[in-house]
Image (cartoon, rainbow, N blue to C red):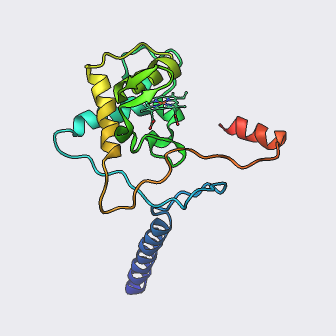
Amino acid sequence: MRHGVSFAVAGATLALYVGVILVGARLGPRALDYGWHTGPKVEPWRMARVSGDRAGEIELGRRLFDETSVYSSAGVKSRISCSNCHLEGGIAPYGLAVVGSAQTFPQYSKRAGRQITLEDRVEECMTRSEDADALPVDGREMKAIVAYIDWLSEPHPQQAAFVGRGLEVLPKMTPDPVHGADVYAAQ
Ligand code: HEC
């Protein structure tokens, strides 16, 4: 009888473990698919692990990017973060990703009327989009944000290239104010 109970407990524990593993496998990394996506199929791309000397600076950059008003000294009046527009820390396909941005600077800016650097572009978002004070170009915070974007932009030879820079052109949609109200309330 005692043995019967032990076997039942062992069996139940095993079943629980197998169940957790199976659920984990189903929830594993998948390519993002937003349904209305019209571009090429999004390939799996993953952030590299951060290690070595730069880890602390990149981590600070990630925090500044995700929670700008919490970590930045540049009085963010809007209390908005880079990640509110550059979704998921700047890696969401067609969500204004900054993966690969490092390679596109310096570039000519129509707004500035001159060649601008990545630091200039970050500063534009800081002062215009965030309604914050400018960050000192050689300061710790600017260096950390640029280090984060540089790190995200590094090519990963073993992986598919990142697909999904910029924004998606949305198909024509029929306005639906009722559904719109649900989305507004949820977001
Ligand atoms: C209110 C929305 C908003 C916020 C907040 C914002 N940005 Fe932007 N950002 C944009 C838009 C819009 C663009 C232009 C995208 C384009 O030209 O395709 C842009 C462009 C950029 C680019 C150039 C990307 C490229 O590849 O050309 C960088 C880098 C950037 N932002 C960094 C930041 C950083 C860092 C922060 C936070 C300090 C930030 N942004 C906050 C909206 C925002």
Indicate the position of residue 81 as horizontal and vertical percent values: 48, 28
Question: Which image quadrant is residue 62 in?
Answer: top left
> In the rendered image, which quarter contains the N terminus?
bottom left
> In the rendered image, which quarter contains the C terminus?
top right
Question: Which image quadrant is residue 137 in?
Answer: top left
* Residue found 34% across the figure and 30% down from its top: 145
* Residue placed furthest toward the left: 53
Q: Nearer the viewer, residue 53 or 150?
A: 150
* Direction from residue 150 to residue 15 in the image, left or right: right
Question: Looking at the picture, does residue 84 appear above or below residue 10?
Answer: above
Indicate the position of residue 90 as horizontal and vertical percent values: 45, 40
Indicate the position of residue 53 as horizontal and vertical percent values: 16, 39
* Residue found 36% across the figure and 51% down from its top: 47
Query: Does residue 79 appear anywhere in the picture?
Result: no
Query: Does residue 44 appear anywhere in the picture?
Result: yes
Q: How many marks?
A: 0
Q: Nearer the viewer, residue 161 or 176?
A: 161
Q: Nearer the viewer, residue 108 or 83?
A: 108
* Residue found 44% across the figure and 60% down from its top: 44
